[in-house]
Amino acid sequence: MSRPKLWTKDFLIVSIANFFLYFTFYLLMATITVYATNKFHASPSMAGLASGIFVVGTLIARLFSGRSIERIGRKKMLYIGFIFILIITLLYFFVNSLALLLIIRFLNGAALGIASTATGTIVANIIPKERRGEGTGYYALSVTLAAAVGPFLGMSITEHASFNMNFILCLVLLAISFLASFFLKVPKVTLSIEELEKMKGFKLSNFFEPKVFPIAIISAFIGLGYSSILSFLTSYATEINLVDIASFFFIVYAVTILVSRPFTGRWFDSKGENFVMYPAFLLFAIGLLILSQANQGYAILLAGVFVGLGYGTYSSSGQAIAIKVSPSHRMGLATSTFFIFLDAGVGIGPFLLGLLVPFSGYRGLYVTMAAVIFVCAFLYYFVYGRKVMLAKKTQSAEIN
């Protein structure tokens, strides 16, 4: 019996659209602090705020877009997100003060939150159930590649051309994605009157999918661990005199995910989520431990391999679990709930962990984060993993 087709036109369109969305996010995230410093003479803290306030806008938008997507329509929500982000990107050319830059960055984050919630919900409906882990894994590569290519290209453009070239590139790529989305066929979801009534009002369940909370809470801690790398790797590498080699960390990280993703996605579908999730926690923790003890360049690169296998596998598999445990008509809420918690961990992490650094140092920080990730494996067992084991035992007993 042949497996259902995964690489359809619609899957490719939505994956490429998501890649360009996150490409512009990471490109500007990596360069906007330089822009704010050079153009408005912003202090390091204000320049950092110009970069980080984006995440606040994204989180708030996810709350409302996840709640509204099924009522508005998935494709309409995608159009709204793209139109919004195109307009906001255009406004970068007219920024004449730091205050205006902060407002535009916040709105840019909100626009990404709307558009990416739509792409995540649409792709969840396009991927065949039998290939959910594999399909989600390949789709998640769009974010991984964007995280590697975006900052690299943004920094190169900033160094060799005018900063406005970054905005022009973002505008062109987003426009191409918007035009491509018109050729996207999105399966319609018809909600019953009862389902529509339940989605009205300001109840918690209208902003979050409660069934996703167990895996989402774990995701917040995983995001916290990853933020320690995003925010402090450069400072740590400077301290141990390994800045040059550290710049290759994310390249190694991205290549590792590219190589491993086809296997981890298939194992998720054929052997179950526990088969890939427990090793993901362990590998991520080992990567952080290796990083904490790095004295040579090869150790930082080796850490990149382990973090890629650990965090990279978790991020796609965790999203697949969130979709799996949720009703089909609440996929939008499931997607937004998962990423709200993951983004919150990544977004709040720099501030919380920054308070820890003066007491622990960078090495102590990474040891602490390794311990947190290791504990997450036990937390996963109690909130989700053991349920999967019991379900398999029950299914096996019924067959026998």
Image (tube, grey):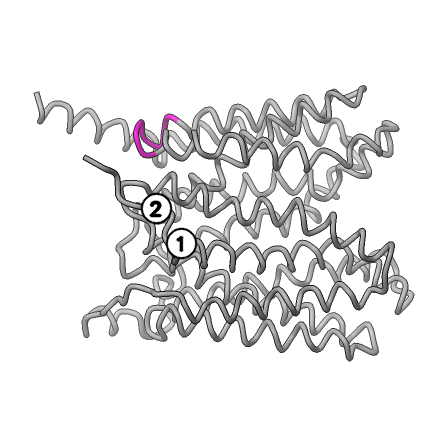
In this rendering, position of residue 130 left or right of residue 135? left
User: Which residue in the structure is indicated by mark 2?
Assistant: 6
Cα distance between the residues tagged 2 and 1: 7 Å
Q: Residues within 10 Å of mark 2 (few under 14, many from 20)?
A: some
Q: Is residue 308 magenta?
A: no
Counting residues from the start of the chain, the first of labels 2 and 1 encountered is 2
Residue kind at label 2, given as amino acid type: Leu
Residue 322 location in percent, x, y? Answer: 37, 47
Task: Report the disc number at residue 179.
Answer: none
In the rendered image, which quarter is residue 283 located in?
Answer: top right
In this rendering, position of residue 296 left or right of residue 258? right
Which residue corresponds to the image point at 61% horizontal and 50% vertical from the top-left?
146
Which residue corresponds to the image point at 29% horizontal and 47% vertical from the top-left?
128
Residue 2 location in percent, x, y? Answer: 23, 37
Q: Is residue 274 magenta?
A: yes
What segment carries the magenta color? 269-275
Q: Taking 341 as reference, is 359 above or below it?
A: above
Secondary structure, magenta segment, majority class? helix
Q: Taking 196 as reference, is 378 above or below it?
A: above
Element on which disc 1 rests = helix
Residue kind at label 1, given as amino acid type: Phe
User: Which residue in the structure is indicated by mark 1?
Assistant: 11
Which residue corresponds to the image point at 46% horizontal and 41% vertical from the top-left?
316
Quadrant into which the C terminus falls: top left
Q: Residues within 10 Å of mark 1 (few under 14, many from 20)?
A: many
Residue 241 location in percent, x, y? Answer: 88, 28
Q: Is there a contact, CB below 8 Å, between mark 2 and mark 1?
A: yes
